[in-house]
Amino acid sequence: MASLSIDNVCKTYNNGTDVLKGIDIAIDDGQFLILVGPSGCGKSTLLNMIAGLDDISSGDIRIGARRVNDLSPKDRDIAMVFQSYALYPSMSVRQNISFGLEIRKQPKAEIDATVNRVAEMLQITHLLDRKPSQLSGGQRQRVAMGRALARNPSIFLFDEPLSNLDAKLRVEMRTEIKLMHQRLKSTIVYVTHDQIEAMTLGDRIAVMKDGIVQQFGSPQEIYDN
Ligand code: ADP
Ligand code: ADP
């Protein structure tokens, strides 16, 4: 686990669009940060910068004491859960979860133990031999979470992970994510449009608008006025 600090991060796309105009955010080890703001304000862009999926134009991102600007996604010790799950369609659930450990050359026995432990935690043990196409939306989301959990990263990044689920599953998974955070004390950055998710899950909320952080604080500070 690790703290995260984002210092004066700017992003201008090649076509000249200024998307991020000096983002400053710092959270402690184990804190759950929520990013909210209108569509197009740059939430996904910021998440991609933390993940290393896209270059920042200026500024610094630190995970723990380490400046990660120039590190590849693989070397950043983060794991990301996407809105559309982004599972590998031709791989089984087991392979989807183990793949990230195999490319990091973990020993086979260790990988098997991790996959089994994570599958048990997420109650997907009976699905390990299936392909993603044979799963419901809620099950796919569990596999996507399992893949991230198996990595045991310093920071989890979630991009609207529950927005494709129906209302009942959304509440159920929200509770599970909260329990997971309490249990593992993970550092999390979580993008959502859902105010209840933000209030239930967040230790800190950053409200973004027009490429800057307009408000930053605890859920009480953000929503009680
Ligand atoms: P969301 O609002 O759900 O985050 P968007 O519809 O804004 O997603 O964007 C979907 C994808 O399209 C993103 O990966 C984003 O990088 C890309 N994208 C969005 N706008 C543009 C654009 N103007 N030019 C090129 N790519 C874009
Ligand atoms: P959000 O996640 O808050 O909906 P995004 O980060 O997806 O916002 O997008 C922020 C802005 O950047 C949008 O105006 C989008 O059109 C633009 N954008 C995203 N990706 C690209 C891209 N690859 N090239 C140009 N513009 C982009």
Image (cartoon, grey):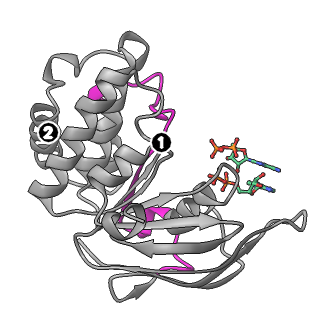
Q: Nearer the viewer, mark 2 or mark 1?
A: 1
Please identify the quarter of the rendering in which residue 223 is found: bottom left
Magenta stretch: includes residue 84: yes
The residue lying at 65 percent from left, 60 percent from top is: 42
Q: Name the residue under label 1.
A: 82
For residue 160: magenta?
A: no
- 223 vs 127, nearest the viewer: 223
Tell me if residue 98 comes above or below residue 77 in the rendering: above
Residue 115, position in %: x, y? 17, 38
Q: Mark 2 points at which residue?
A: 112
> For the residue carrying disc 1, how many other residues have a C-alpha within 10 Å: few (<14), some (14-19), or many (20+)?
some
Q: Which mark is drawn over residue 96?
A: none
| Amino acid type indicated by mark 1 | Phe
Residue 188 visible to an observer of this rendering: yes
Question: Horizontal placement of 214 versus 195: left or right?
Answer: right
Q: Report the span colored magenta.
A: 68-95
Residue sitting farthest toward the right: 15
Expressed as whole percent of the image width and height from the top left, the position of residue 130 reads 30, 15
* Residue shown at the point (45%, 74%) measured from the top left: 216
